Amino acid sequence: MSKVRIVGPKECSDNVLNVIQQLECMQIERFEEEIESPEKRYHVTEKEITEKVYLEEFKQKINELFSYLPEVEVRKSYINPVNVLDFLKNLVDKHKEYSRTINEEINNLKQNLSSLEKHRSFLTAFEDIATKDYRLLSSDAVGLILKDKKYLENLNLIVEEITDNAYEVFSRILDDKSIAVIYVFDERFAEPVRKKLSMENVKEYQFPEELESKSFFQKLSYISDKIKNMENEILRKEDELHNFAVRWLPVYQSVLNWINARLNLISAKNIIYETKYCFVIFGWLPSKDLEKLKNAIADYCLEEIDIKELEITQADLNRIPVMLHNSTYFKPFSLFTRFLPLPSYTSFDPTIFIGIFLPVFFGMILGDMGYGIIILIISLAMIFLSKPDTTVSDAGKVFSVCAVYTIIFGFLYGEFFGSFGRHIFGLEPILVDREEEILTTAYLAVSIGVFHVLLGLVLNGISSIRSKNLKSFITSLAMTILIAASVVLLVVLFKWEKGLLSMSLIWIIVGLTFVLVILGGLIAPLEILKSMGNIISYVRIMAIGLASVMLAHVANMLSGKAGNIFLGIFIAVLLHLLNLLLGVFSPTIHSLRLNYVEFFSKFLESEGKGFKPLKK
């Protein structure tokens, strides 16, 4: 990132700002220490204040209009926003009221429809009999909802007694497993039946009050028709609003984009400086874009503009904006780092380290060729069946890399669905037999932990050099040497090789501990213990991987003892599928934890400020 100063004649300031805005590559900022008298800040004119108020009011009305419109694909508008600005300003209130009114009508219809929706399942259940013309037989009916079918027999006896067995009963099971019942009988029995059911605490199915005067089947027919009419009316009004949005949204969007660009430009003027004859603009831009900015300003025939790259001072380090840019390989791994705070300018982009270590840890933990092949197939399907640069596509790319490492480590471990590959293909472990050499696997995991934690301390030292923090650099260097010496000492003592080397290491550890106490106070020894605990935490690579190996072994053993080939295959597929599911989630979570907690805590400084260039 480059710190830049642009100086030129006062009357050219608008043109320079326009170029900067077109390129969208420079963040304008105030640097009071670079100006002798802060009174030289640019003062917004009364005309610009009036324009800003006008545009902000217009912008608010457009956003309010957008809130009433449906989402549609916005085609590009070729109308010059400046030419239609005043015209749309006079029209926007009318369009806003029109859209709001239709929206309210749609919402009211939906609310009314929602109140009738509870009758839909009942109506649908008896659609076959609702079409019969019971009115010709002077019939009436009573509808009921029962929680249990056992009550139906008692109700049949009640209705049979009142109607002298002159009734029909229809029952249906609804979606919520309740029982819908209709009793059909002569209308002269309606009142006695309803009265008796009320005495038995059986509630009749309730229809809207405005339908009280209608017979049961008239109610059914009326509600069915009303629901259909409402749905049709909702569709008609939604189509009307959609067509309006298709016609006018591109125009308003074009104007809104212009307004935002103009407001950004007016706001940028508040950050620049000016004297009686010239202007001064300070800011940040990517170093690679410096020549592009110079050439663009020269193309506007502004040769008298002076663009100079300034020296970045110690005071600037905390305010240099951060812009993360990852290569094609690392970009999908931002799926796991985009929710983290931005790193400071002197720190490192965590996405790169996630891209390096997550697949390695994942492969080491799962380490099975069979599982890796299945994950690879699923990952490739996620990539090719989803849209590019989506969460699903990025996840597919990440896990495809993890799957490749899983296959590699599965080959090194000699595992293909556990020991199945050894019996069928004659696979043999090359690196380590995880099922037998548990202690060796633990040593391997701890060794990786030592490397990972020491790398974090080295990176912290590099960050300290970048930020010119000598104390932090010495602390990181001392901690790195101390932990390395402690690990070597443990290896020496473990092999019972006592002597000059072990005593030398002890004195180095004591001396460096004393240095750390001087630099960091009494809390320094706790940091040492914390780092050693971080290293031991890497044993989880061995432990989780061993659990996966054991579950695969159990799956193969039980399938072999099933006594039936089909039952054996079923057991094997079921247990291996369970192991695969655990083998995706558990390695991912613990691999991320090793990076977030044990690794990033050693060097990552999350105090970065995002790069916000002046945009259109």
Image: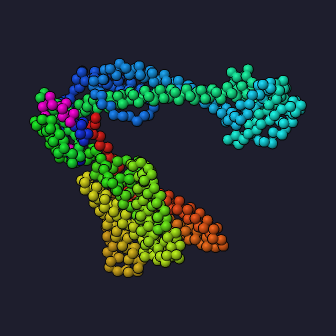
Question: 539 or 389, which is in the foreground?
Answer: 389
Q: Quadrant of the C terminus?
A: top left
Is residue 552 magenta-colored? no
With 174 as the anchor, is 392 left or right in this view? left
Expressed as whole percent of the image width and height from the top left, the position of residue 280 reads: 17, 35
In the rendered view, would you say 469 is above or below 283?
Answer: below
Residue at 51% x, 24% y is: 104
Q: Residue furthest left?
A: 304
Q: Quadrant of residue 200?
A: top right
Is residue 9 magenta-colored? yes
Expressed as whole percent of the image width and height from the top left, the position of residue 342 reads: 35, 47
Q: Quadrant of residue 110?
A: top right
Residue at 39% x, 28% y is: 247
With 396 as the anchor, is 513 left or right in this view? left
Q: Which residues are magenta?
A: 3-19
Residue at 27% x, 29% y is: 262
Question: 471 or 480, which is in the foreground?
Answer: 480
For the question of whether residue 312 can be seen, the reply is yes
With 143 as the anchor, is 601 left or right in this view? left
Expressed as whole percent of the image width and height from the top left, the position of residue 497 reads: 38, 81
